[in-house]
Amino acid sequence: MPDSALVIEDLTCPVLTATQREILEHTESLAVDLTPEVLIGRAIEYTGLDDFGAADFRPRLDAYARAADADSGNTNLNRLILQNRIVRLLSQRLLLTDLLRRYPEIHDIEIERPIIVVGLPRSGTTHLVNLIASDARRRALPYWESQEPFPLRGEGADVNGVDPRFTRSVAEHQSAMMMTPLVQAMHDRFPQAIEEEVELLDLDFASYVLEWHGRVPQWRDFYLGLNQDEHYGYLRTILKALTFLRGPRQWVLKSPQHCEQLGPLIRTFPDATVAFTHRDPVAVIQSAVTMLAYGDRIRRTEIDPYGLVDYWVDRIERLLQACVRDRELVAAERSLDISFHQLNGNELSILERLYAANGTEFSAEAQTAFRAYLDDNPRGKHGRLQYELKGHFGRSPDEIRSRFGFYFDRFDIREEA
């Protein structure tokens, strides 16, 4: 085992630190109200605005809040986090509507030839999108901006030229690292890191992201029944508004959700170039459930490792079944399939092919930026975890892998775990 390997001995029976206990105890007595009307009122009070745009979001908001409220396994801290999340989403929706009203020319902006990375969580999508985003010609979505895409009216940079939204994100990140420090080794979501636009889709209460914050199968079923063409259209409007505030126009995007929404994705962005990443689902699942179980020490009243792995084996299977079914909706000349084992050391040749498909010059300046990013961000930069799929979750790699023969048959994937 390499010296940098991290082992979480107490993953399923956590031994909380003094800081974790103090935070959980402090928040236990706080009143948390997930009633939609209350959440709407708080967003209106925070922004000073009251126009949310099209009223069709209300049934989705109701379902979203109802699913969060029905999750009886949440700690009060996680209920508070979810309450604040919904208020933030509503506030951002108000700010977007106001921005569009004041600057209707936003609607005329085109989102031209984006590169969109599509793949499972933990399959190299984060590495690839951050790498592409190092090209200064590309517009990407840093984490701090994904949380507050639109500034409050009248709120600008401080005396040092720092956006207060970034300052708030730094404080949030520091707090998260204090509560769950090992997350950095699993998914380093620091403020400047490139984030998924699924966070933007959530402004329309139409994404799968709530599933990562709690046990909400009723939300999963509701989300899967939505007409996503409408909501991906809303995403396009958000991207136009962000382009208006801070260009350039050529975006690089990524989200695992796109695996099961390839039809809406390519109808919304018909000139996109799509980079599909593929990895052994066992490696993906053991990484994802370990990360979730570790975070559950502050999110949930007890850890449920078997329920957790059952849910995400099923969820990943659904994502991949849809991806295999709809892969041909994206034209071969506008797409690239990238196996996880190809990423380590072959990035520049992969990007050269991707840029050719996108019709973008593979410039010397971009190549220099790519090399600098790769040099500064080696795999395992923050340490690597040792996973215990059988020991922690009671499932063997072969047992899980047997569910995914259809995926191995379709793409070039190597067994890892």
Image: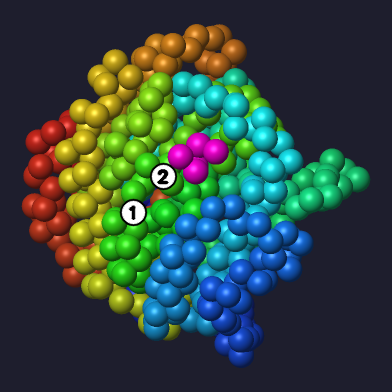
Q: Position of residue 301 (x, y in %)?
A: 42, 83
Q: Is residue 89 above or below residue 190?
A: below
Relative depth, front residue between 154 and 131: 154
Q: Position of residue 403 (x, y in %)?
A: 11, 53
Q: Amino acid at mark 1?
A: Leu
Query: Can residue 242 be seen by looking at this rendering?
Result: no
Which segment did they paint magenta? 233-237
Q: For the point 66% across and 72% down, which residue is it?
A: 41
Residue 230 image label: 2
Quick check: 310 left or right of 6? left
Residue 226 image label: 1
Query: Can residue 156 be seen by looking at this rendering?
Result: yes
Distance from disc 1 to disc 2, alpha carbons, whole Å, reads 9 Å
Q: Are marks 1 and 2 in contact (CB under 8 Å)?
A: yes
Which residue is farthest bottom? 29
Q: Position of residue 211 (x, y in %)?
A: 38, 63
Q: Position of residue 174 (x, y in %)?
A: 65, 60
Q: Is residue 99 above or below residue 371?
A: below
Q: For the point 35% across and 70% down, which residue is it?
A: 216
Helix, strand or loop at label 2? It is helix
Q: Is residue 51 above or below residue 369?
A: below
Q: For the point 87% across and 43% down, which residue is it?
A: 160
